[in-house]
Amino acid sequence: MFIVMFEWLSMKYTILIWFAFLSQMAYSQTYDLTIEIPNLKSQNGEIQIGIYNKEETFPHDNEQYKMIFIVVNKFTGNYTIEDLPKGEYAVALMHDENADRKCNRNFFGIPKEGYGFSNNIRPVLSTPSFDDCKIDLNRNMTITIKLIY
């Protein structure tokens, strides 16, 4: 009698554990985001890719969800960021030709080095908003960002 009862409880808990495991897998979905950059002006410096997941931090330095630095002469034209949780993101990138890890600007505050944003937003007089640049990452995606020089 006790053996039968123990087997039944054991099977019941095993089923609950499997259900919890499978529901956690479904909840914590991650995806890959591939970024293509087709128009680098030179093979100097590095590319800085900032991934943002909050409107209030976009596109501030040192407030990215994830920051990637790629040496340009090793860049193949695209870069994949793996295992990003499902959600909304905005991407800001810069071709830092002198590799000083700063966005060098002219007298009027306009960047002197190449820069770009997801959705290929071209700012006119101010920095674009998170909403303008956001992408909904709900599957593996490839986006193209054309740099503005």
Image: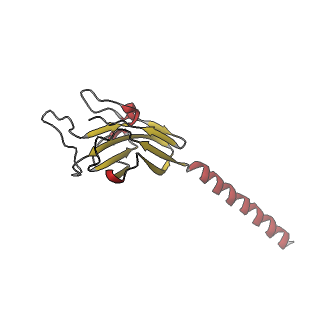
> At x 21% / y 37%, what residue is drawn?
111
- The image quadrant of residue 55 is top left
Q: Position of residue 97 (x, y in %)?
A: 24, 47
Q: Farthest residue toward the top?
A: 124
Asked if residue 5 lies left or right of residue 147, the reply is right
> At x 40% / y 45%, what residue is drawn?
77
Residue 37 visible (yes or no):
yes
- The image quadrant of residue 108 is top left
Q: Farthest residue toward the right?
A: 1
Q: Position of residue 20 (x, y in %)?
A: 65, 56
Q: Position of residue 19 (x, y in %)?
A: 68, 55
Q: Farthest residue toward the left?
A: 107
Q: Is residue 126 above or below residue 94?
A: above
Asked if residue 103 lies left or right of residue 118, the reply is left
On the rendered image, what quadrant is the C terminus found in? Answer: top left
> At x 26% / y 26%, what residue is drawn?
124
Front residue of 124 and 134: 124
